[in-house]
Amino acid sequence: MKPRETEIRELVRHVLHRVLRETQRGEHRLLTSQEIEQLEPGSKIQIEPGTIVTPMAREIALARKILIEEISAKSGQATPAPATGKVVALGADHGGYELKELLKPFLIELGYEVLDVGTHSKEAVDYPDFAYAVARHVASGAAFRGIIIDGAGIGSCMVANKVPGIRAAMCYDQMSAVNSRAHNDANVLTLGAGLLGPNLAKQIVKTWLSTNFEGGRHQPRIDKMMAIEARYLKR
Protein backbone atom coordinates (compact mmCIF):
# COMPACT_ATOMS: atom_id res chain seq x y z
CA MET A 1 0.00 0.00 0.00
CA LYS A 2 1.31 3.47 -0.89
CA PRO A 3 2.18 5.89 1.96
CA ARG A 4 -0.53 8.31 0.86
CA GLU A 5 -3.17 5.56 0.88
CA THR A 6 -2.03 4.46 4.35
CA GLU A 7 -2.34 8.03 5.62
CA ILE A 8 -5.87 8.37 4.23
CA ARG A 9 -6.96 5.04 5.71
CA GLU A 10 -5.59 6.03 9.11
CA LEU A 11 -7.43 9.35 8.96
CA VAL A 12 -10.71 7.67 8.04
CA ARG A 13 -10.23 5.10 10.82
CA HIS A 14 -9.58 7.88 13.33
CA VAL A 15 -12.72 9.80 12.32
CA LEU A 16 -14.89 6.67 12.46
CA HIS A 17 -13.59 5.76 15.91
CA ARG A 18 -14.30 9.29 17.18
CA VAL A 19 -17.83 9.23 15.77
CA LEU A 20 -18.51 5.82 17.31
CA ARG A 21 -17.22 6.96 20.71
CA GLU A 22 -19.45 10.06 20.63
CA THR A 23 -22.42 7.96 19.58
CA GLN A 24 -21.85 5.44 22.39
CA ARG A 25 -21.64 8.29 24.94
CA GLY A 26 -24.96 9.62 23.65
CA GLU A 27 -23.46 12.81 22.24
CA HIS A 28 -24.66 12.02 18.73
CA ARG A 29 -27.09 9.56 17.21
CA LEU A 30 -25.92 7.69 14.13
CA LEU A 31 -28.33 7.19 11.21
CA THR A 32 -27.11 4.18 9.25
CA SER A 33 -27.88 2.67 5.87
CA GLN A 34 -29.57 -0.28 7.58
CA GLU A 35 -32.21 2.03 9.07
CA ILE A 36 -32.83 3.71 5.72
CA GLU A 37 -33.23 0.34 3.99
CA GLN A 38 -36.10 -0.51 6.35
CA LEU A 39 -38.13 2.52 5.27
CA GLU A 40 -40.64 2.59 2.45
CA PRO A 41 -39.44 4.20 -0.82
CA GLY A 42 -40.68 7.78 -1.11
CA SER A 43 -41.16 8.16 2.64
CA LYS A 44 -39.32 10.46 5.05
CA ILE A 45 -37.49 10.15 8.34
CA GLN A 46 -37.13 12.84 11.03
CA ILE A 47 -33.85 13.11 12.92
CA GLU A 48 -32.75 15.04 16.00
CA PRO A 49 -30.30 17.95 15.65
CA GLY A 50 -26.72 16.69 15.68
CA THR A 51 -27.58 13.28 14.25
CA ILE A 52 -24.72 11.92 12.16
CA VAL A 53 -25.93 10.57 8.81
CA THR A 54 -23.49 8.17 7.20
CA PRO A 55 -22.60 8.71 3.51
CA MET A 56 -24.06 5.30 2.63
CA ALA A 57 -27.32 6.22 4.38
CA ARG A 58 -27.57 9.43 2.31
CA GLU A 59 -26.84 7.53 -0.89
CA ILE A 60 -29.48 4.89 -0.23
CA ALA A 61 -32.01 7.55 0.83
CA LEU A 62 -31.42 9.35 -2.45
CA ALA A 63 -31.80 6.18 -4.51
CA ARG A 64 -35.06 5.28 -2.72
CA LYS A 65 -36.33 8.90 -2.76
CA ILE A 66 -36.45 9.07 1.05
CA LEU A 67 -36.33 12.57 2.56
CA ILE A 68 -34.20 13.07 5.68
CA GLU A 69 -35.59 15.91 7.83
CA GLU A 70 -34.05 17.46 10.92
CA ILE A 71 -36.37 18.43 13.81
CA SER A 72 -35.86 21.96 15.09
CA ALA A 73 -34.92 21.94 18.77
CA LYS A 74 -36.96 25.12 19.39
CA SER A 75 -40.13 24.57 17.42
CA GLY A 76 -40.25 20.79 17.29
CA GLN A 77 -40.98 21.09 13.58
CA ALA A 78 -39.06 19.17 10.95
CA THR A 79 -36.93 21.00 8.44
CA PRO A 80 -34.65 19.60 5.73
CA ALA A 81 -31.22 18.79 7.17
CA PRO A 82 -29.05 21.80 6.28
CA ALA A 83 -25.96 21.50 4.14
CA THR A 84 -22.62 21.80 5.88
CA GLY A 85 -20.41 24.33 4.14
CA LYS A 86 -20.88 25.04 0.47
CA VAL A 87 -22.29 21.76 -0.78
CA VAL A 88 -22.77 21.36 -4.52
CA ALA A 89 -25.03 18.50 -5.67
CA LEU A 90 -23.50 17.02 -8.82
CA GLY A 91 -25.21 14.59 -11.18
CA ALA A 92 -25.02 13.29 -14.73
CA ASP A 93 -26.34 10.64 -17.06
CA HIS A 94 -24.04 8.35 -19.04
CA GLY A 95 -23.41 11.09 -21.61
CA GLY A 96 -22.19 13.46 -18.91
CA TYR A 97 -20.39 10.91 -16.73
CA GLU A 98 -16.86 11.72 -17.89
CA LEU A 99 -17.33 15.47 -17.52
CA LYS A 100 -18.86 14.94 -14.07
CA GLU A 101 -15.81 13.00 -12.97
CA LEU A 102 -13.56 15.74 -14.33
CA LEU A 103 -15.49 18.51 -12.57
CA LYS A 104 -15.64 16.74 -9.21
CA PRO A 105 -11.98 17.34 -8.19
CA PHE A 106 -12.16 20.81 -9.74
CA LEU A 107 -15.05 21.74 -7.45
CA ILE A 108 -13.13 20.44 -4.44
CA GLU A 109 -10.14 22.56 -5.47
CA LEU A 110 -12.45 25.58 -5.52
CA GLY A 111 -13.38 24.85 -1.91
CA TYR A 112 -16.76 23.17 -2.37
CA GLU A 113 -18.03 19.93 -0.89
CA VAL A 114 -19.40 17.66 -3.62
CA LEU A 115 -22.53 15.54 -3.21
CA ASP A 116 -22.26 13.11 -6.12
CA VAL A 117 -25.67 11.60 -6.88
CA GLY A 118 -24.45 9.57 -9.88
CA THR A 119 -24.39 8.09 -12.37
CA HIS A 120 -21.23 6.15 -11.61
CA SER A 121 -20.42 4.56 -14.95
CA LYS A 122 -20.93 4.91 -18.70
CA GLU A 123 -23.78 2.42 -18.64
CA ALA A 124 -26.91 3.90 -20.23
CA VAL A 125 -29.30 5.52 -17.74
CA ASP A 126 -32.19 8.00 -17.87
CA TYR A 127 -31.22 11.64 -17.31
CA PRO A 128 -34.51 12.58 -15.54
CA ASP A 129 -33.55 10.39 -12.57
CA PHE A 130 -30.31 12.25 -11.92
CA ALA A 131 -31.64 15.70 -12.78
CA TYR A 132 -34.43 15.15 -10.26
CA ALA A 133 -31.97 13.93 -7.63
CA VAL A 134 -29.83 17.06 -7.93
CA ALA A 135 -32.84 19.39 -7.97
CA ARG A 136 -34.34 17.69 -4.95
CA HIS A 137 -31.17 18.19 -2.91
CA VAL A 138 -31.11 21.88 -3.77
CA ALA A 139 -34.81 22.37 -3.10
CA SER A 140 -34.55 20.63 0.29
CA GLY A 141 -31.52 22.67 1.37
CA ALA A 142 -29.13 19.71 1.43
CA ALA A 143 -27.08 21.55 -1.20
CA PHE A 144 -26.86 25.27 -1.89
CA ARG A 145 -26.35 24.80 -5.63
CA GLY A 146 -26.66 21.97 -8.14
CA ILE A 147 -24.93 21.03 -11.39
CA ILE A 148 -26.36 18.51 -13.87
CA ILE A 149 -24.66 17.21 -17.00
CA ASP A 150 -26.14 15.31 -19.93
CA GLY A 151 -25.44 15.27 -23.66
CA ALA A 152 -26.99 18.65 -24.50
CA GLY A 153 -28.01 20.04 -21.10
CA ILE A 154 -31.53 20.77 -22.30
CA GLY A 155 -33.46 17.77 -21.01
CA SER A 156 -31.97 17.95 -17.53
CA CYS A 157 -32.81 21.65 -17.37
CA MET A 158 -36.45 20.88 -18.17
CA VAL A 159 -36.60 18.17 -15.51
CA ALA A 160 -34.98 20.29 -12.79
CA ASN A 161 -37.39 23.16 -13.41
CA LYS A 162 -40.31 20.85 -12.64
CA VAL A 163 -39.17 20.76 -9.00
CA PRO A 164 -40.68 23.61 -6.91
CA GLY A 165 -38.11 26.16 -5.84
CA ILE A 166 -35.66 25.37 -8.62
CA ARG A 167 -34.46 27.89 -11.18
CA ALA A 168 -32.30 25.84 -13.52
CA ALA A 169 -30.31 27.41 -16.35
CA MET A 170 -28.51 25.74 -19.22
CA CYS A 171 -25.29 27.70 -19.81
CA TYR A 172 -22.98 27.43 -22.79
CA ASP A 173 -20.44 30.21 -22.13
CA GLN A 174 -19.29 32.52 -19.36
CA MET A 175 -21.72 35.29 -20.29
CA SER A 176 -24.75 33.02 -20.01
CA ALA A 177 -23.38 31.79 -16.67
CA VAL A 178 -23.07 35.35 -15.36
CA ASN A 179 -26.53 36.33 -16.61
CA SER A 180 -28.23 33.28 -15.13
CA ARG A 181 -26.89 34.11 -11.68
CA ALA A 182 -26.82 37.92 -11.67
CA HIS A 183 -30.24 38.41 -13.27
CA ASN A 184 -32.14 35.14 -12.71
CA ASP A 185 -30.68 33.87 -9.41
CA ALA A 186 -30.33 30.36 -10.91
CA ASN A 187 -29.66 27.70 -8.30
CA VAL A 188 -29.09 24.79 -10.70
CA LEU A 189 -26.72 24.76 -13.66
CA THR A 190 -27.06 22.32 -16.55
CA LEU A 191 -24.28 21.58 -19.03
CA GLY A 192 -24.14 19.74 -22.34
CA ALA A 193 -21.14 17.44 -22.36
CA GLY A 194 -21.46 17.02 -26.10
CA LEU A 195 -21.32 20.78 -26.65
CA LEU A 196 -18.56 21.88 -24.28
CA GLY A 197 -14.88 21.12 -23.95
CA PRO A 198 -13.52 20.43 -20.44
CA ASN A 199 -11.75 23.81 -20.12
CA LEU A 200 -14.83 25.81 -21.10
CA ALA A 201 -16.97 23.70 -18.76
CA LYS A 202 -14.62 24.53 -15.88
CA GLN A 203 -14.74 28.23 -16.72
CA ILE A 204 -18.54 28.19 -16.80
CA VAL A 205 -18.77 26.34 -13.48
CA LYS A 206 -16.29 28.64 -11.73
CA THR A 207 -18.01 31.76 -13.07
CA TRP A 208 -21.50 30.50 -12.24
CA LEU A 209 -20.60 29.58 -8.66
CA SER A 210 -18.77 32.85 -7.98
CA THR A 211 -21.39 35.21 -9.45
CA ASN A 212 -23.85 36.74 -6.99
CA PHE A 213 -27.46 37.65 -7.64
CA GLU A 214 -27.70 41.41 -8.16
CA GLY A 215 -31.20 41.84 -6.76
CA GLY A 216 -32.51 45.36 -7.35
CA ARG A 217 -34.62 45.59 -10.48
CA HIS A 218 -34.26 41.83 -10.98
CA GLN A 219 -35.89 40.83 -7.67
CA PRO A 220 -39.48 41.75 -8.65
CA ARG A 221 -39.07 39.65 -11.78
CA ILE A 222 -37.88 36.67 -9.76
CA ASP A 223 -40.84 37.19 -7.44
CA LYS A 224 -43.20 37.08 -10.41
CA MET A 225 -41.51 33.94 -11.69
CA MET A 226 -41.97 32.17 -8.36
CA ALA A 227 -45.53 33.48 -8.06
CA ILE A 228 -46.41 31.67 -11.29
CA GLU A 229 -45.02 28.47 -9.80
CA ALA A 230 -46.97 28.99 -6.57
CA ARG A 231 -50.18 29.54 -8.54
CA TYR A 232 -49.98 26.03 -9.98
CA LEU A 233 -48.91 24.45 -6.70
CA LYS A 234 -52.18 25.64 -5.12
CA ARG A 235 -54.31 23.74 -7.63
Image: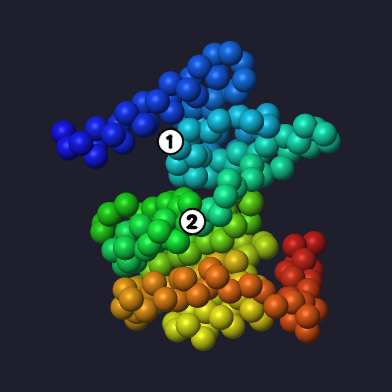
Q: Quadrant of the N terminus?
A: top left
The answer to whether residue 101 shows anywhere in this view is yes
Whether residues under marks 2 and 1 lie with C-beta atoms below 8 angstroms apart, the answer is no
Residue at 28 percent across and 34 percent down: it is: 7
Q: Secondary structure at mark 2?
A: loop
Residue 63 is situated, as x and y percent measured from the top left of the image, at 46, 44
Viewer-nearest residue: 232 or 189: 189
Residue 203 is situated, as x and y percent measured from the top left of the image, at 42, 76
Which residue extends farthest left? 1
Residue 2 is situated, as x and y percent measured from the top left of the image, at 17, 37
Residue 191 is situated, as x and y percent measured from the top left of the image, at 43, 73
The residue indicated by pointer 2 is 112
Residue 26: which disc? none
Q: Amino acid at mark 2?
A: Tyr
Image vertical order of residue 57 relative to residue 149, above or below: above
Image vertical order of residue 149 relative to residue 101, above or below: below
The residue indicated by pointer 1 is 56
Residue at 83 percent across and 35 percent down: it is: 75
Q: Amino acid at mark 1?
A: Met
**Quadrant of the rendered structure where residue 216 is?**
bottom right
Horizontally, residue 27 falls left or right of residue 15, namely right
